[in-house]
Image (cartoon, rainbow, N blue to C red):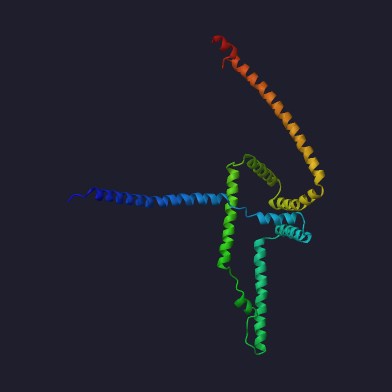
Amino acid sequence: MEPTKETQKELIEETTNMLEKLKEVTANPSTQNDKDHVEKKRQVKNIENPFKNLTHRVTQLVYWENPTHSGAILAASLSFLIFTAYYSLFNTFFALAAILIGVNWIYVMGFKQFQSLINQKPVNPHEHLLVNKPWYIEREDAEKYLDSIIDTANFVLLEAQRIALVDDPMRTMRHVFMFYILWTLGTWISFRTLFGIGLILSFSTPITYQKNKEFVDEKLYQFNKFLRSHFDRGLTMAKQHSGGVYEKAKSFAVTKGLVNDDKTAKKEE
């Protein structure tokens, strides 16, 4: 018995529907992956600056909004630099660990012996800390800190990529100039001395500029004007000099027969 036209039509529709479903099933993973990739790329590009809050705190420090806090930070930082210039952090850490733990051991053992002498059960005087305040990191806190570290690392890597691959030419040139200055200074003075100078300037320059803003701005404007005038004059002289060199080189090449003179070429034409 041959199938009727209606039966054939139904078979064709069912086959078409099955093919469309199969196409959707095979196409969805790829499409979804593309969407996820685009979304991930968008998220990477829109990483927020993790140093925003830190920038505000640093501004408060260097502008001495809280003189006691700023002075304490500056004094502690300079003391640390001076200390590390004469003593090793490695030796200092293990020396302090040996002394403090040794003194605490003597205290605990003496406390237990005293309890035994007065007919009490020897108990560690730090028992409440051992039971109620153990030293460990909560998993939730660790995940939060890890996310912050990853965001910070991604932000730094993206900024480094934009600088190294010249996303903004002027910004890249500023960093090249800064790196060159640090490189040059590093050949003359040690990193510790350079860091100490930078620390002192960081705490003194902003507040000095704020107190003498008008005077400093005027001097900076005059200096920039002076540099610009000399730069323009040098650029004009360079153009004139380069033009004369070009003419001399061209006449020399024509004399030696390396190139044809424009006038001779026109006559030959």
Pick whichever, 35 or 7, lies toward us: 7
- Which residue, as the protein is rendered here, is positioned at the far top? 267
Q: Quadrant of residue 251?
A: top right
Say which residue appears at 68% left-offset and 75% top-offset: 103
Residue furthest left as drawn: 1
* Residue lying at 65% horizontally and 73% vertically, measured from the top left: 101
Q: Nearer the viewer, residue 247 or 150?
A: 150
The number of numbered badges drawn on the structure is: 0
Residue 90 in percent (x, y) is at 64, 62
Identify which residue is drawn at 41% across, 52% down: 29
Q: Quadrant of the C terminus?
A: top right
- The percent position of residue 204, horizontal first and vertical second, equals 78, 52
Q: Is residue 188 left or right of residue 14?
A: right
In this orientation, which residue lies closer to the viewer: 220 or 91?
A: 220
- Residue 27: give x, y in percent of width and height: 39, 50
Residue 60, position as x, y percentages in the image: 74, 56
Relative placement, left or right, of 178 versus 68 is left
